[in-house]
Image (cartoon, rainbow, N blue to C red):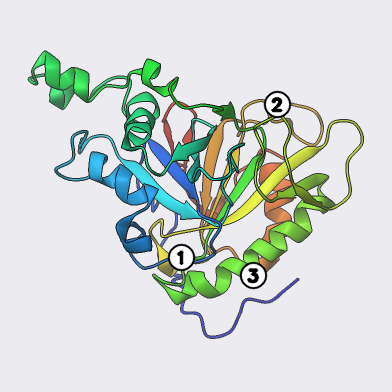
Amino acid sequence: MPPLPDGLEIDHSKPLNGTMAAYAEQVVICTGKDDWLSRIEDENSGDNLAADIKELMGRGGMYSDPYHHVSITNSSFPSSIPSRSEIQTTSTYLFPSFKYVPFLPRVSFDSVQALVKGYLLPKKLHPAHSNLSPIHKDRLTRNEDQGRFLPGVRDVKDVVVLICGHGGRDMRCGVLGPVLREEFEKQLPNGGFQVLKGAVDVGDGRERDMISGSAAEGVPRTARVGLISHIGGHKFAGNVILYIPPGTKTRDGRESELAGCGIWYGRVEPRHVEGIVKETILGGRVIENLFRGGIRQGGEILRL
């Protein structure tokens, strides 16, 4: 198996379990880039989706809520292309909701508000908010009708592998991230997955992808592998998040116990990737000595 690159100072002394910070939703923004500035909201002089969401949900924002943490990350996945290509839009994944939002117009702040109000705010407020006025409570609570203003939203059916590769923040992930991405793209086809690359085309119901690996018989299993920005714990590089969609079956046809979950691993080396594909993605089992934490669809935080 490929060795770990030399010269990386990885913390092997601290236990990994519980080092994942709790969150309600992870927003994975499709930028088509492999690396970003240390503060992703500073990209493109502040004209970007991460900055827009943080303006609404961050400290002092209209929807700021210290009891409801939404993780905002950039990714290397490219955005979907709208039918009118002259319109500039950004795509994003939402986990563990397992939703893909293909078209968020860059010129429309209303679409960002629809994303936040329709998908990111809590359905039920924390008890600490019991003394707020009804108007304030309503503002901080999700209104799913708002999400209907966003076109083409669809369920995520692919296994999604996210690897911290944020070299602009810390070189440990910057060096190790691309190595792990290459290894996952090599090992997933060995497990019967088609690795999808390129933009998701939702305009006509089909996906426009380049596919690596051989097709499985019947309906193939599919996966996407991308680099993401800082998620915390660079000293535990490589950091990998596996989002396993609802309804996923194990290798032997049983429903996976991890279906609808996000599993965070730390200290992942290239030599671990084959085992992660076999044990976790195909077997539905957590690898205990790599486990940082997890989340179930609906927001339940998973610990060992």
Counting from the top left corner in percent of width and height, residue 65 is at: 20, 35
Mark pair 1, 3: CA separation: 15 Å
First along the sequence among labels 1 and 2: 1
Secondary structure, mark 2, is loop
Counting from the top left corner in percent of width and height, residue 76 is at: 56, 57
Numbered label attached to residue 255: 2
- Asked whether, in this view, residue 286 is left or right of residue 74, the answer is right
Tell me the kind of residue under disc 3. Answer: Val
Tell me the kind of residue under disc 1. Answer: Phe
Tell me the residue that label 1 is attached to. 236
Tell me the residue that label 3 is attached to. 179
Pick out the residue farthest to the bottom: 7
Secondary structure, mark 3, is helix
Q: Which mark lies nearer to you, 1 or 3?
A: 3
Mark pair 3, 2: CA separation: 31 Å
Among the 4 quarters of the image, the one containing residue 117 = top left
Q: Residues within 10 Å of mark 3 (few under 14, many from 20)?
A: many
